[in-house]
Amino acid sequence: MEHIDDNELNIIIKERIAKVSDKIDEACKAAGRDRSEVTLIGVSKVFPVNYAKAAIRAGLTDLGENRVQELVPKYEDVLSEGLKCNWHLIGTLQKNKVKYIIGKTKLIHSVDSVDLAKEINKRSLGSNIVTDVLLEANVSGEESKHGFSPESLKGALEELATLENIRVRGMMTMAPIQQYEGQAREVFAKTKEIFDELKSGTKDPSYWDTLSMGMSQDFESAILEGSTCIRIGTSIFGDRRYIDNH
């Protein structure tokens, strides 16, 4: 990959964020929603930390990572420069990695089992904090995807209501790779229905306020169906296939 110096990178990332923001504005207007209801999370996975820093300098307040082993060093590097952002873990989280990220995340999007939630609760208790999480829901039913089935979410919420050191803020889902036009939006609409149905049964309904769905290829449809967090990688940072981290 051709080397880009930091000044040029800052300009490129700022322009891309502006374009995505314009599309968010348009989608919110079409949905009759306030722009403040949607949080843009820049997904900097596999990109060097200078990409994350460029996004923060451009005004992006939230960044997402798929892996703990990427999030932690980026978190520390960004902090060491006096830059501030909210970090989101959006990828699969293994129980043995939980201890490394407690206290570092604004939100963990990918709680896909009761056992994982209990481990987050235990580690949060040890650090005397409350960790905000989302339940990952496999609404599309694809075997390749992680998450609770729609039928198991209510029971999981009831079990998690006894845990004092995690706060379940809502749900996350991923749409399938579309086999036909509109398939992603159907999944988003179904997820929103489930989200609304579950709200009244949560420990504190006032905290059930976050629906994470939508990526570069489908975030406008997600916003139209009620998403409050969109996870954007390619449209901000570029094509990961051409990144050389070596």
Image (cartoon, rainbow, N blue to C red):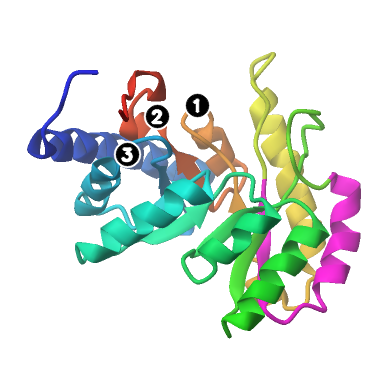
Q: Residues within 10 Å of mark 1 (few under 14, many from 20)?
A: few
What segment carries the magenta color?
149-172
| Pointer 2 or 1: first along the chain | 1
Cα–Cα gap, marks 2 and 3: 16 Å
Residue 3: quarter of image: top left
Disc 1 residue type (three-letter): Gln
Q: Mark 3 highlights which residue?
A: 22
Q: Mark 1 highlights which residue?
A: 217
Q: Quadrant of the N terminus?
A: top left
Question: Dot 1: what SS?
Answer: loop
Q: Is residue 92 left or right of residue 1?
A: right
Residue shown at 62%/76% (left/top)?
A: 124
Tell me where residue 244 appears, x and y as whole percent.
Answer: 31, 24
Q: Mark 2 highlights which residue?
A: 234
Residue 60 shows in this picture: yes
- Vertical relation: 89 (above or below) 206: above
Residue shown at 64%/45% (left/top)?
A: 92
Q: Between 208 and 101, which is closer to the camera in this rendering?
A: 101
- Vertical relation: 91 (above or below) 105: above
Is residue 71 magenta-colored?
no
Is residue 166 magenta-colored?
yes
Please identify the residue farthest to the bottom as the structure is shown. 128
Residue shown at 27%/41% (left/top)?
A: 51
Question: Dot 3: what SS?
Answer: helix
